[in-house]
Image (cartoon, helix red, strand yellow):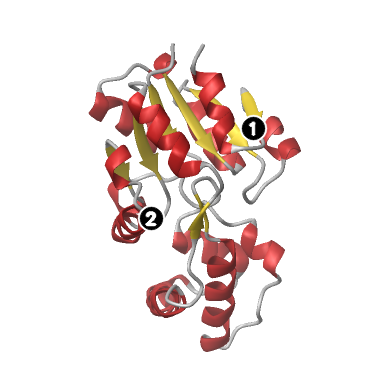
């Protein structure tokens, strides 16, 4: 019986794709770099910011990363006022139903903690979340299992009673590494095939499909 639902944020709860793509492209322009195609940027969603930058632009010097990150955050804070992320369909109602049914809900994201908290509160779903873990709360980010292991330890839940839900293969790999159940969602930034290849126990097309899955 699954008691704990560990959720990714970007691409699972909230549609932040356009904001992330536009922020990366504007950052690349300001850093006088070639602008990446959207699909190349989308493939890095779920990675920590520094790792994503290096994946897209492998020739960036490590000593220049702090400046890249600073510019990215400045651009992101500016653009999010006009490109406002929204929750995916049925997310808020499903979280409310899971909360009412006695499930514990947490978020484990590669987004920075403050940005994550701002979104959760702004979107009105923070009351349903028992524990929030951001990129700056761990030493090893996805696909390493540390975010899940730390969540399990904090909430005193065994791995076999937890499920990790995410839209990217790194979410599935993170959950499997911690020996938790895993569930992919197809409406985010990856594909059914990639999620199954990563080893997802289930793959869903709508967030509300979690309700019948977790009611057994």
**Do callouts 2 and 1 mark residues in contact (Cβ within 8 Å)?**
no
The mark nearer the N terminus, 2 or 1, is 2
Residue pictured at 37% horizontal, 21% vertical: 101
Q: Residue furthest right?
A: 193
Relative side of 164 to 203, left or right: left
Instruction: Return the residue nearer the eye: 59 or 48.
Output: 48
Give the answer, above or below, for where 43 lies relative to 18: above
User: In this orientation, which residue lies closer to the viewer: 136 or 4?
Assistant: 4
Q: Is residue 32 visible?
A: yes
- Which element carries disc 1, helix, strand or loop? strand
Residue occupied by mark 1? 204
Nearest the camera: 118 or 99? 99
Q: Which residue is mark 2?
A: 123
Residue at 35% from the left image edge and 46% from the top image edge: 125
Q: Is residue 177 above or below residue 59?
A: above
Q: Secondary structure at mark 2?
A: loop
Mark 2: give few (<14), some (14-19) or many (20+) Cα within 10 Å.
some
* Residue 201 spot, x, y in % from top left: 61, 22
- 57 relative to 52, above or below: below
Q: Position of residue 118 (x, y in %)?
A: 31, 60
């Amino acid at each position: 019986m699954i008691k704990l639902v560990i959720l990714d944020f970007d691409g699972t709860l909230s549609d932040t794709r356009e904001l992330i793509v536009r922020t990366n492209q504007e950052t690349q322009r300001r850093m006088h770099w070639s602008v990446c195609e959207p699909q190349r940027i989308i493939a890095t969603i779920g990675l920590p910011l520094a790792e994503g930058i290096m994946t897209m632009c492998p020739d960036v010097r490590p000593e220049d990363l702090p400046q890249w990150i600073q510019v990215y955050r400045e651009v992101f804070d500016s653009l999010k006022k006009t490109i406002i992320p929204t929750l995916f369909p049925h997310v808020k109602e499903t979280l409310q139903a899971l909360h009412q049914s006695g499930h514990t809900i947490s978020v484990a994201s590669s987004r920075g903690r403050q940005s994550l908290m701002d979104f959760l509160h702004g979107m009105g779903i923070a009351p349903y979340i028992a524990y929030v873990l951001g990129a700056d709360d761990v030493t090893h980010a996805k696909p390493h299992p540390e975010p899940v292991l730390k969540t399990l330890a904090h909430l005193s839940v065994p791995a076999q009673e937890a499920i990790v839900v995410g839209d990217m293969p790194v979410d599935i790999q993170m959950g499997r590494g911690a020996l938790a159940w895993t569930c992919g969602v197809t409406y985010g930034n990856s594909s059914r095939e990639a999620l199954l290849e990563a080893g997802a126990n289930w793959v869903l097309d709508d967030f509300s499909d979690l309700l019948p899955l977790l009611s057994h």
